[in-house]
Amino acid sequence: MSRRHTVINYVSSGCRKIHPILFLRVACLLMFAGANIAQAEVPPAPSGYETPEATKEAIFSGKIKLVHFNLPVPSSVKVEKGLEYGKGGDVSLQLDLYSPKEIGTAVPGVLFIHGGSWKGGSREIYHSYCVHFAERGYVAATVSYRLVDVAPFPAAVEDVKCAVRWMRANAERLGVDPNQLAVVGASAGGHLATMVGYSSDVAELEGDGGHSGISSRVQTVVDFYGPVDLTTDFARDKGPILDFMGGKRFEDAKQQYELASPLTHVTADDPPTLIFHGTIDRIVPIHQSEMLVARLEEEGIAHEYDPIEGWPHGMDAVEGVNAHCLAKMFEFFDEHLPLPIEEASLGAASQ
């Protein structure tokens, strides 16, 4: 159901007992806010380049502006850093939480999963996205997980599933709707986000980090250029994949490589998915996303695919590409993970 229809239903069902003139004023106000949210134009991604090298040169020369990763936190947003969401063996698993300071009706929760070939990166990279989402009205978290120097697959998958369970288990305290959760990730984080999205019914990937008995299922997935099939020639036995798989080569561990591939787990009941991929990505070939799109279509799963012409891996670090992707995410979430009307109106007013 679209935001506009949600607004109409809300006004029609919930406001009929008030004075007719006041009813019309409320209806107009909510319709205006809902229309702003649902119909806000997504800015096009800026023109790209022929090669990743040309992109780097444009960055170094100052032709391309990068995202302000240390975005100031507005007064409407509360940040709590270093919250423990579970344990990975003896490792404290932590996240940073970004919430609207004022939450009325419970809102959707969004978990961001950083990339870095499963061996590097940090949750702080998603600070700016979390600020934007919390300012919009969502509760957002950016999570850390065990990297390969601590534990190989399936540790990282188990950890991010634990983070989903933590948010669902603490939903009332956090002001989160436990039935409206999303995961977003890029590169290795995109792989982990799709693993969470498509393998909620695979018990051997749940782990024992905490909150047992709570579902790790999510309602929406956003995948930025993540690998989805580790059994393909591009992936198998490559350095980062070998590290992720604990040094096991494909020929000796085919079932493990399949288990670690999101594409293996796609079934018709999986959540709506938004996919971004740059057409000149040499690190994760765009064919990985094309295979995912084909599988989602085969299973009849709602999805949107946004191949961005002339941009390489890590493209959303570029200011213009980031603005396009952020607006596209909000548009997709308005359709598949909508905010309650009153929270959406406040979010629209603050921007």
Image (spheres, rainbow, N blue to C red):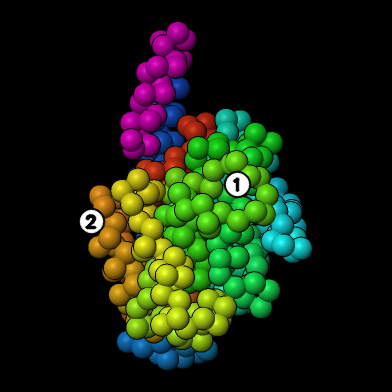
Which residue, as the protein is rendered here, is positioned at the far left?
298
Identify the element where label 1 is drawn: helix
- Residue 75 image position (x, y, % from top left): 69, 48
Report the residue marked by disc 1.
Answer: 165
**Of the pair 313 and 149, the residue shown nearer to us:** 149
Judged from the image, the secondary structure of the residue bearing numbered disc 2 is helix
Left or right of 237: which side holds 169? right
Determine which residue is flagged by label 2.
Answer: 298
**3D distance between C-alphas at marks 1 and 2:** 29 Å
| Span colored in magenta | 1-24
In terms of image quadrants, where is residue 72? bottom right
Which residue is found at the position 74% from the left and 53% from the top?
A: 83
Is residue 311 visible from the viewing direction of this image?
no
Is 18 within the magenta? yes
What residue sits 33% from the left and 35% below the top?
1
Q: Are marks 1 and 2 in contact (CB under 8 Å)?
A: no
Counting labels gives 2
Residue at left offset 49%, top offset 40%: 180
Q: Is residue 208 left or right of residue 228?
A: right
